[in-house]
């Protein structure tokens, strides 16, 4: 349906996730009949389908099984290596360890810090993102 709505012949469609997730077997199903995890897969496929230069992903792995989560994370990393800007919002910091290069941390609508992940790890001595952020937040909390 989405391909038929946007009939731009000049765009090379990216159907990699569609194939990897096996969604071709479900193409006759209505979205409302799909499980939450399968809907998340469809949403991920749609985010990448038209090959945008900038992707904004909100909790991209939420509801995905471990295999699908790894497929999506590998796709995100491949697209990042192509020079695409990928913004990810997430409360699940452990999911971001292998995906991000910079951290913008906000709390209660306020920017707490913005820094490269390497600087964050160096400053805190922590490898895991969740521990590094917790370390900074504990230092700044009165």
Image (cartoon, rainbow, N blue to C red):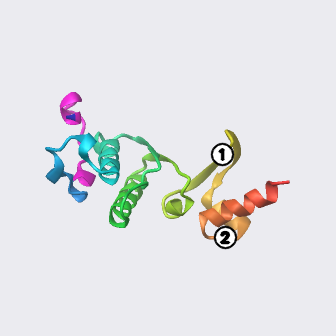
Q: Nearer the viewer, residue 84 or 68?
A: 68
Range drawn in magenta? 2-18
Q: Is residue 7 visible?
A: no
Q: Is residue 119 magenta?
A: no
Within the magenta stretch, is there residue 15?
Answer: yes
Q: Which mark is residue 46?
A: none
Name the residue located 31 percent from the left edge and 47 percent from the top edge. 39
Q: Identify the residue under disc 1.
A: 106
Q: Give the residue number, with chain letter if any, for mark 2.
A: 126
For the C terminus, give its image quadrant. Answer: bottom right
Percent x, y for residue 131? 66, 66
Residue 5 horizontal side relative to residue 70, left or right: left
Q: Is residue 5 above or below residue 20?
A: above
| Image location of residue 74, percent across then percent down | 37, 61
Q: SS for tag 2?
A: loop
Q: Nearer the viewer, residue 78 or 58?
A: 58
Q: Position of residue 135 (x, y in %)?
A: 73, 63
């Amino acid at each position: 349906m989405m391909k038929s709505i946007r009939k731009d012949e000049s765009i090379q469609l990216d159907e990699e996730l569609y194939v990897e997730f096996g969604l071709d077997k479900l193409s006759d199903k209505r979205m409302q009949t799909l499980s939450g995890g399968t809907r998340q897969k469809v949403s991920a496929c749609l985010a990448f389908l038209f090959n945008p230069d900038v992707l904004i992903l909100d909790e991209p792995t939420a509801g995905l099984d471990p295999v699908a989560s790894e497929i999506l994370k590998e796709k995100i990393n491949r697209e990042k290596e192509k020079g695409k800007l990928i913004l990810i919002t997430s409360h699940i910091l452990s999911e971001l360890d292998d995906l991000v290069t910079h951290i913008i941390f906000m709390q209660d609508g306020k920017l707490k810090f913005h820094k490269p992940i390497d600087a964050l790890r160096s400053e805190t001595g922590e490898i895991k993102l969740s521990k590094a952020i917790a370390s900074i937040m504990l230092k700044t909390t009165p």
